[in-house]
Image (cartoon, rainbow, N blue to C red):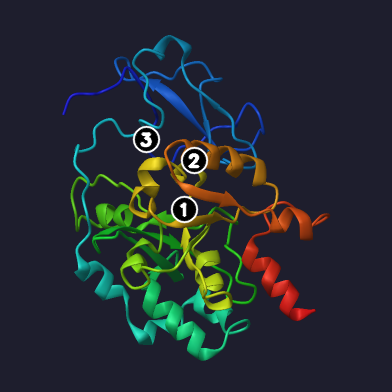
Amino acid sequence: MEKAFKYSLERGSKKFLCPNCHKKTFVKYIDNETGEYLPDRYGRCDREQKCGYFQTPESAESTFIPNAVEVMKPESTTYLSLDHLDSSFNSEFEKQNNFILSLNKILDDHSIKRVISEYFISTYNYWNNWATVFWQIDEKERVRSGQVILYDPHNGKRIKKPFSHITWMHSILLKKGEIEDFNLKQCLFGLHLINDYPDRNIAIVEAPKTACIMSAVYPKFLWMATCGLSNINPEKFKPIKNKKIILYPDLGAFDVWSEKAKTLKKFGYNIEVSSLLEIKCKGYPKGLDIADFFIKKSKN
């Protein structure tokens, strides 16, 4: 396939210091004709909420399409086989899954089993440990891929040192040679559940972990996760356009999510943004999510 853009964000895991927050989370633009980096100011910081720096090449305005990262991908969306999901969905592995072990401290057995069953929470031995797979399954029950994340079994927090323990199942399978070219087109985590609960209003958070916990804490809503701020857009939300949607941003992200909601409203979405954390959690560190709030509340 010919390269579609003159400039694109570099593929792979290589990161540079961000010119704004000075963290090593910056992806640079490259010139696809020469393979050389553009000046250091052009690129995107992966810390979407805490930094949000994103500078596109000014000379590419006529040809640039935002987030055109992998210009050599197949045009059509590809999917993983259900066999890949089934192979990781094993009740014996659950006893070693760090995320599930952490749930034992805050949820009862019945709620945990329901969360595992409904969201197909799976276990994968990676980074020499038992990581959690949060499968993205769309409304037609096609497996888009799965986020693989390693948690601390004691506090339920994502392990970030000495590096961020998060990847995708299709990336692992590509490295193992089990699949070939793969074009990931994400969907909302938990989207498949609209077939089981067609009458429920939709509540959306950023992290799959948060959606899972809240589905047990407040089952009145159908909880989904964006798996990234960039996924709050009309295309990703299209399967739930006829639903009542409430966004629950992490503490400190209310304004950013509100701007996203304004765009969706222009496309006819019935959507609102909850300010619960901004009101109830003043003085708490940014990044606190709705599940953290309810867990803290239950302990008081």
Mark 3 or mark 1, whichever is nearer to me: 1
Position of the C terminus, as image quadrant, is bottom right
Question: Residue 214 placed where, x, y %?
Answer: 56, 71
- Label 2 environment density (alpha carbons within 10 Å; few <14, some 14–19, many ≥20): few
Q: Which residue is mark 2?
A: 265
Separation of residues labelled 2 and 1 (CA atoms): 17 Å
Q: Residue at x 62, y 67 (%)?
A: 291
Say which mark, if any, is on residue 226. 1
- Precedes in sequence: disc 2 or disc 1: 1
> Looking at the picture, which amino acid does disc 1 mark?
Thr
In this view, 265 is above or below 200? above
SS at circle 1: loop
In this view, 1 is above or below 229? above
In this view, 42 is above or below 189? above
Pointer 3 with pointer 1, Cβ within 8 A:
no
> Looking at the picture, which amino acid does disc 3 mark?
Arg
Question: In which quadrant of the rendered view does residue 140 lie?
Answer: bottom left
Residue 72 is left or right of residue 148, and the answer is left
Residue 135 is left or right of residue 131, and the answer is left
> Looking at the picture, which amino acid does disc 2 mark?
Lys
Separation of residues labelled 3 and 2 (CA atoms): 33 Å
- Precedes in sequence: disc 3 or disc 2: 3
Question: Residue 142 placed where, x, y %?
Answer: 23, 60
- Label 3 environment density (alpha carbons within 10 Å; few <14, some 14–19, many ≥20): some
Front in this rendered view, residue 245 or 157: 245
- Label 1 environment density (alpha carbons within 10 Å; few <14, some 14–19, many ≥20): many
Question: Residue 204 placed where, x, y %?
Answer: 51, 58
**Name of the residue lying farthest toward the bottom:** 109
Mark 2 or mark 1, whichever is nearer to me: 2
Q: Which residue is mark 3?
A: 11
Question: In which quadrant of the rendered view does residue 18 lie?
Answer: top right
